[in-house]
Amino acid sequence: MARLSQEGRMPPVSGWSSVAKGRRIMTQLEALLESIDPDRTLDETRRRADRALDSFHAGSGLIDNWNVFQSFMTRLHCHLNNTVLRTTSLVHPNTIKVPKSKLTLGR
């Protein structure tokens, strides 16, 4: 392990001829830490989620059928994933056919 100099600093690393190179590396490290800051990441995710909800076309305001509800929730889920995660689905959400389920889920 390297020893600190009397001034409390690490001795120069071989290959680094100046403090400027060390500062440049710290700047890169600081930039990386800034880019993965949780506050920044959460703010961006919230913006994408808001954008996804604002851009989702719900169709009519009335759902009176279980299959229509399943289709609606599937389209919403796909749209949210595509927008928030910046992915593209293999199937357009409006063309998804939800199979008829025998599961009632307490309707």
Image (tube, rainbow, N blue to C red):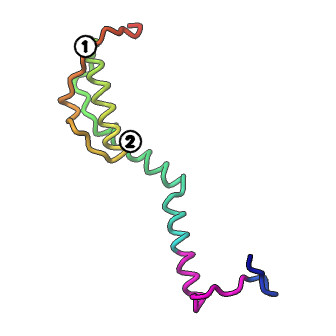
Point 30% across, 19% down: residue: 70
Q: Quadrant of residue 95?
A: top left
In the rendered structure, which amino acid carries the disc numbered 2? Asp
Point 26% across, 11% down: residue: 65
In the rendered structure, which amino acid carries the disc numbered 1? Lys
Residue corresponding to mark 2? 50
Q: Tell me if 45 is positioned left or right of 22 in this view.
A: left
Question: Depth check: 9 or 58 in front?
Answer: 9
> Mark 2, residues whose alpha carbon is within 10 Å: few (<14), some, or many (≥20)?
some
Q: Quadrant of residue 53?
A: top left
The image quadrant where one finds the C terminus is: top left
| Residue at the far left in the pictured view | 95
Is residue 23 within the magenta segment?
Answer: yes
Question: Depth check: 10 or 33 in front?
Answer: 10
Mark number, residue 100: 1
> Mark 1, residues whose alpha carbon is within 10 Å: few (<14), some, or many (≥20)?
few
Q: Which residues are magenta?
A: 10-27
Q: Tell me if 73 is positioned left or right of 46 in this view.
A: left
Report helix, strand or loop for mark 2. Answer: helix
Total residue callouts: 2
